[in-house]
Amino acid sequence: MCGLCGALGAAGHWTDASQRPQAFAGRPERPLRQERYERIALLNQLLRPYRLQLRDHQGSAYLLRSATGRQAVLRELCALWPEAERLSGRRCDPLDPAFIAALAPAEG
């Protein structure tokens, strides 16, 4: 998709809604932006075993990048896991024991 078409699309997917609007009272633009960055940080922890990284793209999309430089622009988070599978070349299964083990902190 070209950048212009992506910019003109409808805004407001449910995954971008603020879960804590009262936490940032007095700063109307802050809740969504702050929660977006927190959401991205959490997702990057989940994507690390697949050697993928998610970034904000102009506040209206996400940029998913692989360790080899492949990338995809995601309009909404519902496209994350199919694109993660495509870019990593692996099936992304959050219930896979190997995936869960990779997320666990190292003991010792």
Image (tube, rainbow, N blue to C red):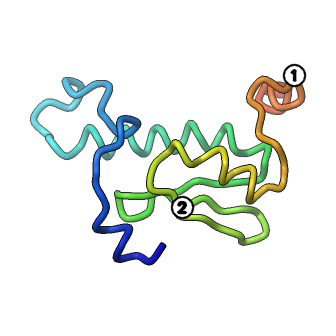
Residue 19, position as x, y percentages in the image: 32, 26
Residue 53, position as x, y percentages in the image: 64, 54
Q: Nearer the viewer, mark 1 or mark 2?
A: 2
Q: Image quadrant of residue 9? A: bottom left
Q: Quadrant of the C terminus?
A: top right
Question: Eyeballing the image, is 48 above or below 75?
Answer: above
Residue 100, position as x, y percentages in the image: 80, 25
The residues tagged by marks 1 and 2 sit, at their Cα atoms, a distance apart of 32 Å
**Is 29 in front, or is 83?**
83
From the viewer's perspective, is 28 left or right of 17? Answer: left
Identify the mark nearer the N-term, 1 or 2: 2
What is the crowding at mark 2: few (fewer than 14 residues within 10 Å), some, or many (at least 20)?
some
From the viewer's perspective, is 78 left or right of 3? Answer: right
Q: Which mark is residue 63?
A: 2
Question: Eyeballing the image, is 3 above or below 61?
Answer: below
SS at circle 2:
strand
Residue drawn at the location 65% of the way across and 44% of the way down: 81
Tell me which amino acid carries mark 2.
Leu
SS at circle 1:
loop
Residue drawn at the location 40% of the way across and 43% of the way down: 36
Residue drawn at the location 44% of the way across and 63% of the way down: 57
Q: Image quadrant of residue 45? A: top right
Tell me which amino acid carries mark 1.
Glu
What is the crowding at mark 1: few (fewer than 14 residues within 10 Å), some, or many (at least 20)?
few
Q: Residue furthest left?
A: 26
Residue drawn at the location 28% of the way across and 25% of the way down: 20
**Is 66 in front, or is 27?**
66
What residue sits right under mark 1 in the picture? Answer: 107
